[in-house]
Amino acid sequence: MKHGTVTGYNRHKCRCDGCKAARAAYDADYRARKRVARKSAKPRRRVHGTLNEYNNHRCRCPLCKAARAAYDKQYSIDTNRAAHRRKRRARLRASGDWRTQP
Ligand SMILES: [Zn+2]
Ligand SMILES: [Zn+2]
């Protein structure tokens, strides 16, 4: 059989330096390929056009910027309404107090 091959290590259970080195190289290569696969698979899980992407991944692509702009718009509408209600209540209360003053 040929030494210094993964086949020698796996099939013939040879543990000579050549076969061990071949197996180690194969393992390192396998791990590296897995690492690369994991890395390249990651971006596919990211969904653009979401606030999460904008905030947590600091993505500034047009889709994520639009998501952020939409959120900002909604948020400012909500806070404006709340501020308006607060102001109205405060004004009513103030005018009531003013009227009850002697
Ligand atoms: Zn061998
Ligand atoms: Zn994006």
Image (tube, rainbow, N blue to C red):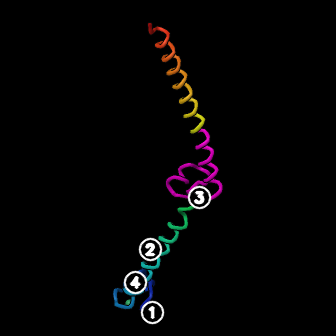
Q: Categorize mark 4 by other alpha carbons within 10 Å: few (<14), some (14-19), many (20+).
A: many
Whether label 3 lies within 8 Å of ligand 2 gets the answer: yes
Res 22 quadrant in image: bottom left
Reading the image, the residue beneath label 2 is 31
Between discs 2 and 4, the one toward the N terminus: 4
Reading the image, the residue beneath label 3 is 60
Reading the image, the residue beneath label 1 is 2
Between discs 3 and 4, the one toward the N terminus: 4
From the image, state whether disc 1 or disc 2 is nearer to you.
2
Residue 51: x and y, percent?
A: 56, 49
Between discs 3 and 1, the one toward the N terminus: 1
What's the amino acid at mark 4?
Answer: Tyr
What's the amino acid at mark 1?
Answer: Lys
Reading the image, the residue beneath label 4 is 9
Which quadrant does the C terminus fall into?
top left
CA gap, disc 3 and disc 4 = 50 Å
CA gap, disc 3 and disc 1 = 55 Å
Res 2 quadrant in image: bottom left
Q: Is residue 96 above or below residue 46?
A: above
